[in-house]
Image: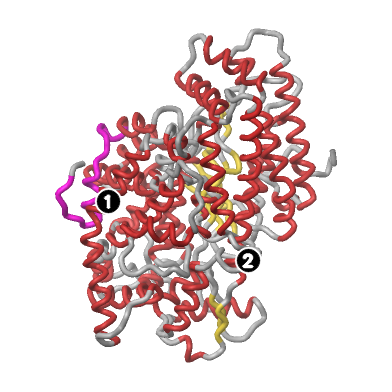
Amino acid sequence: MNASNPFFQHWTTPHETIPFNQIRTEHYEEAFLEGIRRENEEIEKIINNPEEPTFENTLLYHDPEHDEEYYGLLDTVSTVFSCMLSAETNDELDQLAQKIDPILTQHANDIQLNPRLFERIKYVYEHHGELTPEELRLLEDSYEGFVRSGALLNDEEKQQLRSLSEEGSMLALQFSQNLLKENKAFQLHITDEQQLDGLPETAREAAAHTAKEQGKDGWIFTLDHPSMSPFMTYSTQRELRRQLYMAYNTKGIHQNKENNLDICKRLVNIRRQHAQLMGYRTYADFVMVHRMASSSENVYKLLNNLLDAYRPTAEKERQEIEAMAQELEGPDFKLEPWDLAYYTHKLELKKFNIDAEMLRPYFELSRVIDGVFGLANRLYGITFKENKEIPVYHPDVKAYEVFDRDGSYLAVFYADFHPRKGKQGGAWMTEFQGQWINRKGENIRPHVSVVMNLTKPTDKKPALLTLGEVSTFLHEFGHSLHGMFANTRFESLSGTNVWWDFVELPSQFMENYALERDFLNTFARHYETGELIPDDLLDRLIASRHFMAASGCLRQVSFGLLDMAYYTKADEFTEEIIPFEKSVMKPAILGRQRMDTCMTTQFSHIMAGGYAAGYYSYKWAEVLDADAFAHFKQHGIFDQATAQSFRDNILSRGGTEHPMTLYKRFRGQEPTIDALLERDGIKVTHNS
């Protein structure tokens, strides 16, 4: 081992945070290989133990020769490497990922398919004595994890499963790398100022700033959301809107080496084959065993109920937009997808005299940070203090110490705000260190991170966000609270380690505050004058809260239908991706679909992000979050007693109990769809 490799050293950083400033690309591979060696050593000691298998000597094995972090090396280096691949990658890291991924997959298979290790766990599962509820949950999860990874298969089936998982892992990695390259390859470079017509000053300045960063004249627009979205909303240049739209919606289907069509088809079939090897008819059936929804039928019931409830309103919304476009352009005007954002904005202006740019001056990033942190303080009593001594992996990243109501240290929180070359699009939360209680009884506190792609500052203005970006921040911050408040014994059950259709509850719950006057008035001040957001602007904003809500719901339902269509297939998937996609999404699509665009090839959630047969989770959790927030509204949206109950019963308990048990303990009853329909302004007769 190279003693200078930071992964092999005891970290002396604040709270033993990751020394990003010391880690180099060459450090990863030897740390991966040493981590694998250590885990293999640990497993050998467990399976060669001559004593009767017990919960302690098998699931909680402790080697007195080493501290508890010794065998955690592989988890540590994997966590750091995964973060860098998503948030700050380069060609060297991408190449290393291609090299190391099959090694890691083989290692994981070696563990999950180790018959001697499984026999010990199976023995404990069948013969355990009295265990605490959390210990029992860990044992059940461990046993089921091995079974679901093929431990009960015969040798030939195990080899098939091993091959499938290795191939699937590589293809998911290739999918992500292709998508990032496609996303970064396109630029709309404008040198004629007349082609900026309609664009607000913030969009022009950001595009000029991007061009300047690249040493070019004029203005550059990219496929990153903060750049593309204002262009699609405000630009009068229909042809340029079309170019941007088509560039975004054809990612992964060009005739180049970044084409994802065959990769997607193969991933769908790999997952189906995996499920069928395990004795399930479809991959969705395999997945639903550990979901609140429990069956594909229940997922379709939710999606179809939402379709029935929202489609009539969504059709009216579509008619209004078409009428708006024809009012402005003439009765023969045909609305295309690249026109939707533009004329939706025109309609919103007409109906409510409001748009995102009117709000932007009141959402300066540093004030938004204060507002979000202030909300957490008001609800839970926690405080945030930036610590510049904590190393970060990019200057955009801020690191904070988080303190609980009593002043005790709670967590480290990282926030990575802006798009850049080596960063995937979208927003996500991750953990560099989970929460757990070690053998000495010390509560090891979590290090959590949120990564976003929010509007960047320019030479002339600070980062001024849209309301949608504020909601994104609140969403990811909700995930981080789930991590920061974790208070369980075992790391694998702590924080966001919950069933997939429960994990979005804490995040989507926080989004509710984005349209609450009493919250906005705590921080939404004009970045130049310091004046609070005007009451009349807030009135118009709140009046517009239902605007296009039904269309937004149908969009999510269309993605849920697409996901379920792929993963409820029992036969080999041989169809052409694009026609198949259009046919299954059709019930939730308003207007004509284009056959020269594709969602599947850029649908990271279900191809590479863990949401396969699980995208419905966003709508499932929306029912929960609307119901939970309705409970808060009954007691006051800042009510600390209600917040404490939410923290104690949901945020701090992780996956230690069934999600519905936790929810009912907080809410006193199971959720209904009523609160969601009311929040979205949908008035229908329905069965809850």
**What color scheme is it?**
secondary structure
Task: Give the numbered dot on residue 399.
Answer: none
Give the distance between the C-alpha atoms of the residues marked 1 and 2, in whole angstroms: 38 Å
Residue 106 on image: x %, y %:
69, 37
Tell me where residue 208 appears, x and y as whole percent. Answer: 56, 81
State the mark number for residue 306.
1
Q: Position of residue 90 (x, y in %)?
A: 70, 60
In the image, residue 562 sits, relative to residue 594, either above or below, namely above
Range shown magenta? 666-686
Q: Quadrant of residue 58?
A: top right
Q: Which residue is mark 2?
A: 421
- Can the viewer see residue 535? no
In the displayed structure image, the side of residue 204 where residue 359 appears, left or right: left
* Residue 519 lies within the magenta run: no
The residue closer to the viewer here, 348 or 105, is 105
Q: Main secondary structure of the magenta part?
A: loop
Residue in the picture at 75% in, 30% down: 38
